[in-house]
Image (cartoon, rainbow, N blue to C red):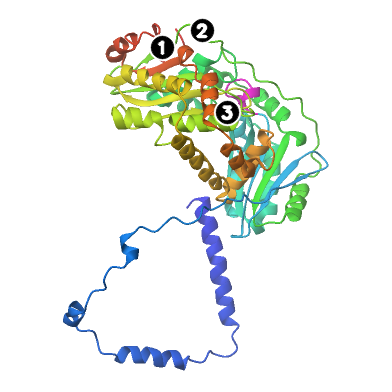
Amino acid sequence: MNQKSRALCFFTSLLVAAASACGAGDAEPKRPDLANENAIAAKQTQKPVDPEERAAAPKPSPGDFRKTAPAPGPAVTFSPPKIEESRLDNGIRILHVERRELPIVALQVSADRGAGEAAPGVASFTAAMLLLGTKTRSALKISDEFLKLGASVGAGADYDSIGVGARCLSPKLPEVLSLLADIVINPAFDPAELKRERSRRLTSILQQNDRPAILLSNAVAAALYPQGHPYSAPLIGLEPDVARVSAAELASFHASSFRPDRVTVAIAGDITKDRAVEEIRRAFAGWQGKAQPAKEVGPPARLGEKEARILLLDRPGATQSQVAVALPGVPRVTKDFEAILLMNTILGGQFSSRLNLNLREKHAYSYGVRSSFDMRRGPGPFVAGGAIVRESTGPAVREILAEMKRLQNELVTADELDDARSNLILQLPARFETTSETASTLAYLSTHGLPLDEIATRPARLKAITREDVKRVAEMYLKADIARVVIVGDAKIIKAQLEALGIGSVELLPAAGKKG
């Protein structure tokens, strides 16, 4: 039984016990409801309906309401929950949303430093080690204590942050916070646990050689960012990175990341703001320290201005080609955020996008093609592509590039813009659908330094974007003529197709995805 199931069983048992207690407290047995009993008896003595009579009964004639479909109701306006902010004396920031539907609390303790400020693989490795022992608790003891509390826990890192999170019944919050504080402040980086975790990671990296989509992602990163850039390697790192990382390096990254003035506790659920602040203050009492200034993420590689480059990682016998048309994107904090969201939604950000209607519905080159901007503190990658039938790899690349150029050369239709806008606005409530998603949203706002009304005010900003704005950002960020076309597929079948595109020579990559 997993932790979530245990929590549910525990909660259910509380309800059953409460119900039993209420029943036992009745000093006098309840009197029968005679009126209800008489009504039941009357129903039981009614003459049953003859099936032939029922069949012969006249059928009601269809009214006007059957001839015309009902009109849609008024549009529902989404109002995000109130976000409250506090700050402890030691610098810890607290973001809080109160939700009383269930006796559950979710929280995240995160530092605004991730893989963008570390050597390859270090941030992810550090996050994993947080749950593998503190100075007073072994990995097994940590697991057992969360299990006894009926709480779930996890840890992770991305390019901009590192942290731990938990979900528990609200009465158990003090104990859960105490555990999280110990995990965040006092990790042990035990040599035996580090050895086991290193082995798991090396095995995972080895398994990636059989996953074309991951090989493609790694090759895109290597193509867009210079060697040594924090975005040039996957979060887990490459095999040499994981093999050589030391406990001292992990401890150093932890010490420089987890400082009170860089940490945010995002908490949502069945708890008031005042109680949340008091419990967090009690758990993190005595924790002091000042963080070093955040490092700026360097620029991506300077792409050639004259021709696109085609990078091909050979996978003999592959029946599909994994295709990515890639460019450096934009950082999360940009004045063009909403215009880029709308432009990408029209291009490849929804099922009815231009790319999907073209390559899937019209040409049957793929089951699905998408595009996305991975917006980080620095300019993350833009990627358009998907899994393509290998015999159609070349034509599919041509269509992707053509759709990118069409957005630069023509205004989108009013219907396309309205559809994309509605899609994006209707996605916003999901950010607060559960306590866990609410806590994640709060942590995201803090990591990127966004205002607390970012979600509430986004619909108005989306509605202000014009067709001309979409064309403008397409011209700025969809530079198809200098894109990197990265493909994992059977070179024997697809190399000639790619050369026939006339957009540059085809460069073969070694199996690891690095340029040879």
Residue, far right: 89
Residue 304 marker: 2
Report how far apart the C-alphas of labels 3 and 2 lie in the structure.
22 Å
Q: Is residue 489 magenta?
A: no
Q: Secondary structure at mark 1?
A: strand
Give the numbered dot on residue 292: none
- Whole-percent x, y for residue 6 in the image: 52, 56
The relative height of residue 213 versus residue 277 in the rendered view (above or below) is above
Q: Position of residue 16 (x, y in %)?
A: 53, 70
Read off the magenta span.
Answer: 114-124
352 sits to left or right of 124: left
Q: Amino acid at mark 2?
A: Gly
Vertical relation: 149 (above or below) 16: above
Q: Residues within 10 Å of mark 1 (few under 14, many from 20)?
A: many
Query: Which residue is rendered at x = 55% and y = 19% of the image?
Result: 476
Q: Residues within 10 Å of mark 3 (few under 14, many from 20)?
A: some
Q: Which residue is mark 1?
A: 310
Where residue 9 sits: x, y (%)?
A: 51, 60
Is residue 120 covered in magenta? yes
Residue in view at x 68 percent, y 32 percent: 112
How far separated are the C-alphas under marks 1 and 2? 12 Å
The secondary structure type at the circle numbered 2 is loop
Where residue 34 appears, as percent x and y from the top left, is 46, 93
Give the mark, 1 or 2, whose residue is nearer the N terminus: 2
Is residue 374 shown to the viewer in this render?
A: no
Image quarter hosting the C terminus? top left
Disc 2 crowd rating (10 Å Cα; few below 14, some 14-19, many 20+) is few
